[in-house]
Amino acid sequence: MKKIADDILNKVISSRPIISYKGSFGRVITIGGNEEYGGAIIMATNAAVHAGAGLVTCATSKINVTALHAQLPEAMFIDYTDTTKLNQAITKSNVVVIGPGLGTTAQSLAILKTTIAALSANHFIIVDGSAITLLAKNRNLLSQLKIANVIFTPHEMEWQRLSGIPIPNQDIKSNQSKQESLSANVVLKKYHTEIYHTNGSISQLSIGGPYMSTGGMGDTLTGIIAAFLCQFKQVSTSDRIDAAVYIHSAVASSLATQKYVVLPSDIIAELQHYMLISQKK
Amino acid sequence: MKKIADDILNKVISSRPIISYKGSFGRVITIGGNEEYGGAIIMATNAAVHAGAGLVTCATSKINVTALHAQLPEAMFIDYTDTTKLNQAITKSNVVVIGPGLGTTAQSLAILKTTIAALSANHFIIVDGSAITLLAKNRNLLSQLKIANVIFTPHEMEWQRLSGIPIPNQDIKSNQSKQESLSANVVLKKYHTEIYHTNGSISQLSIGGPYMSTGGMGDTLTGIIAAFLCQFKQVSTSDRIDAAVYIHSAVASSLATQKYVVLPSDIIAELQHYMLISQKK
Amino acid sequence: MKKIADDILNKVISSRPIISYKGSFGRVITIGGNEEYGGAIIMATNAAVHAGAGLVTCATSKINVTALHAQLPEAMFIDYTDTTKLNQAITKSNVVVIGPGLGTTAQSLAILKTTIAALSANHFIIVDGSAITLLAKNRNLLSQLKIANVIFTPHEMEWQRLSGIPIPNQDIKSNQSKQESLSANVVLKKYHTEIYHTNGSISQLSIGGPYMSTGGMGDTLTGIIAAFLCQFKQVSTSDRIDAAVYIHSAVASSLATQKYVVLPSDIIAELQHYMLISQKK
Amino acid sequence: MKKIADDILNKVISSRPIISYKGSFGRVITIGGNEEYGGAIIMATNAAVHAGAGLVTCATSKINVTALHAQLPEAMFIDYTDTTKLNQAITKSNVVVIGPGLGTTAQSLAILKTTIAALSANHFIIVDGSAITLLAKNRNLLSQLKIANVIFTPHEMEWQRLSGIPIPNQDIKSNQSKQESLSANVVLKKYHTEIYHTNGSISQLSIGGPYMSTGGMGDTLTGIIAAFLCQFKQVSTSDRIDAAVYIHSAVASSLATQKYVVLPSDIIAELQHYMLISQKK
């Protein structure tokens, strides 16, 4: 198991080609945010925009459109209950984030099914939060998901639900075995987060701290991973994921010299600057 | 009566354990904000998030969800008229704030009753503003409230309503006697705020100033108290309350070197930084 | 005609009494903001809060409540079509602002009538924008208005409508004669704004500049005047008005060293700081 | 083909006349922002306000009014489906922006038709995004548009649709020939944007970079062009357009020393300062 070191950022965050268009840096669609957890998908969307994704669409409950646009006019919106539009928007996207604030109702499940049905082999899909819980309960969807490049981002309890491995037994060997059977990358969020890649490598985070223990951190991470997958195609998928996970904590660690607790919104606001200085270092 | 000194912050605001989760720092639910006073519960919620509570849910009128998420995507929302969800959310919380912007209508009273019925012996509940007024008029609810750890945060007129002691007669002995019969902590907000603790001690604030005399200050205080009760379990309840009351004025005092009047939003924005430097001092 | 000098701020912006409450600094109600011009009343309200009014309520179209609370949770809201609540809120207020974004429809007129009917001799009322236009067309309301302390804040075209004096003929003598018959203070907004006071004095502004020629400036001024009338009761009404008009341009002038055009939101954000340094100078 | 040099800003951004009114700096109306792309018209509007237009009205879907006012109370709103009001507002405006987030539905087309029908010979109209696509499909509208001073702001694909010239064949001669037949200015957005003026001159941008390749950049540019057309009437239309295009990239380039990707909101926030220092240089 390899510790992710600071040089991952320098390796992954490359200079943008001089001649480029917003399309050059990919299209992300973020799917989630029901009537109660709208903030979660807003943070994911905001992180994707600030981390450099070319175009970002947020598919969420109609109740969330104003809060989204009030702080992030850069994002587009679709009503996630409009199946036709959701399907079209996924088809046009390179990276899908599903889960932040999605909930676990019948409607949430229907949206997850529509999403999975729209995936192709070229898609990346980041599956987080309640989408993981829904998949744990709807095993038949798991195999359909395999058509795409999948990144699960569970915390330990969600991983227990998905993998069937109780938290105390979540050792490297068991985790990797399960990850292989899922044919997916797994970002297991915990103290010293572990990342199990489909290429067989395992990475571990050794930065970050308890100033990050606050609601919305995981939602924010999904947006950063999405943006990194979109942009940095010159490096491997595993490096892109590792760099996204690393920068999320590196920014927080940097801000923790000024703040007792670091909020997701603080990290989002600092991403553009931190990406620049990481590239230059 | 003990003056609260600056060292209360150093004593209470401890380093977070290296291995911790958002759940380690508690769940707060803030209840209030009717169709007219939505700002009050938003400020309370915002203060709780910035003061480090692990997870914060705002139970308010549906009209307030967008204004909440537009400035604070970190918070979750529930419609406070949904009795089932409100009850569930309270059950899962460690600290309840009720009152900011709640109003005094029949609906407000119904929400207060639902809240009190959902309390257990493990709960902390901070009772502020219109919730105090409602309790003063509905004495039967007062005894039901005693099941939990109660903190009342009245200003002098609200204390008159609740205690029956006219403002001119609100001396220490009378206040303490009434506080004891309420089996609750009382934060009596006034020039040099007095805090009557259930352990029999009395503390007094000697900082703060007239730059804090502006709408929303009390709402903001409730959120800070809630976050401190959640997080700093290694010290006594009375120390946590004293520290929360102290930091609220200490931050304002610090900002008053730059501003003629200090707004609640200014205090909220500075909390994370002030908590860090207070810890380090 | 006296030029308002910088020392007006030092004279008016006094230290707050050590023992004070939000009620000590007055209650402002701002009335306006229809379905199209909601921003106008939000700026007036925001200025009143930042300029130190103790408690501020915004009476506006229901469509504006979320935009108000998203940026200013410190303010309270009432639906301006709820006549009973509007009447109660005015009765409890010290200073009324009416006009920013009010419009000139039948509904606007009805709200103006309700407002005037609720005034007492103790009220200050600042009449701006479309409320001036409405009064110019509804002369019978003008005499009812006289019960209160009135401040009109017309620009030259509005003054032409209200006074009947064509812009080219708006000389000092004609203006003062009309102002006397109105029994009101008149802040005639123009290049080098003129202020005609009910005490017979006339003041003139000699600061400010074309960087202030942008939408919303006048709305912002009404909120500052309201806050100054509320707070600084130790000086005359004329001094309070002069100081409010002066600081509005002084802040803009200060910001114009950094910005080609100065927006109302920029001025609002700087008010607290500028009031502090003006007091200390 | 002339490279636009830095001195264009110094030439165009003049000192404002000492005696001036918001009306002196023109009225802009921005038209667009359907239920999904509200952010686009908000960014255009925000850019127009920050770039110094005197009065700015945003005609958009009613769903966007709160997000607009939450971040920009300086702008006015009208419902773009209210044909009467839209027509009146256009008549009163000097510069019209149409297209950002407008969409390509029957409703979008109806709004475009209403807009074109309201134009006079004195109007400037900036036609962007989906409005270009609509015009490419509705050729009869193109000739009606010629009554006004037209500025098209297509990217290469939109130019292909409008001009019929495939992207690989978009050479200077072909572009200019088509631009002449359109009797319009064409800002062809690409790597080193080209501007074809109605006076026969062609300008080219040689600044900017891939940090600008993110959603919303073009929307923001329309607002800046609108504000520059409104204000700087002492120079030619072609200089005003060149300066607006230049400053958009110059601000981004300046911010790119601090940020890996520069967002439209970042550019908007810096415009007032950059205009000041450009004027002074």
Image (spheres, coloured by chain):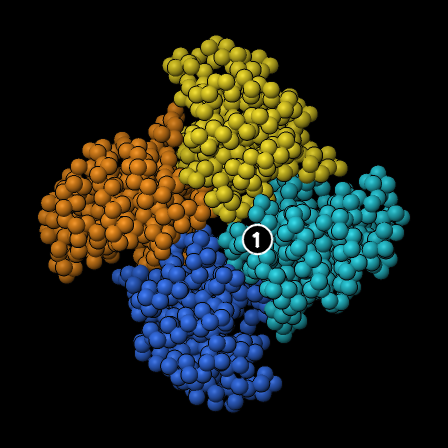
Chain colours: A orange, B blue, C cyan, D yellow
Quadrant in the picture for the C terminus of chain A: top left
- Residue named by callout 1: C61
> Which residue is pictured at 16% across the width and 45% down the height?
A142
Q: Nearest the camera: B193 or A132?
A: A132
Where, by quadrant of the figure, is residue B13 drawn?
Answer: bottom left
> Which residue is pictured at 77% across the width and 64% down the height?
C147
> Which residue is pictured at 33% across the width and 33% down the height?
A26
Q: Nearest the camera: D22 or B223?
A: D22
Q: Position of residue A129 (x, y in %)?
A: 26, 52
Residue type, label 1: Ser
User: Left or right of C198: which side holds D52?
Assistant: left
Q: Compared to A225, does B90 lie above or below? A: below
Where, by quadrant of the figure, is residue A120 drawn?
Answer: top left
> Which residue is pictured at 69% across the width and 64% down the height?
C118
Where, by quadrant of the figure, is residue C123 drawn?
Answer: bottom right
Look at the image and tell me whether residue B157 can be seen: yes
The single residue placed furthest to the front in the displayed view is C106
Q: Position of residue D166 (x, y in %)?
A: 39, 15
Q: Nearest the camera: B277 or C242?
A: C242
User: Left or right of B245: which side holds D88?
Assistant: right
Q: Position of residue A137 (x, y in %)?
A: 17, 53
Q: Compared to B143, does C149 lie above or below? A: above
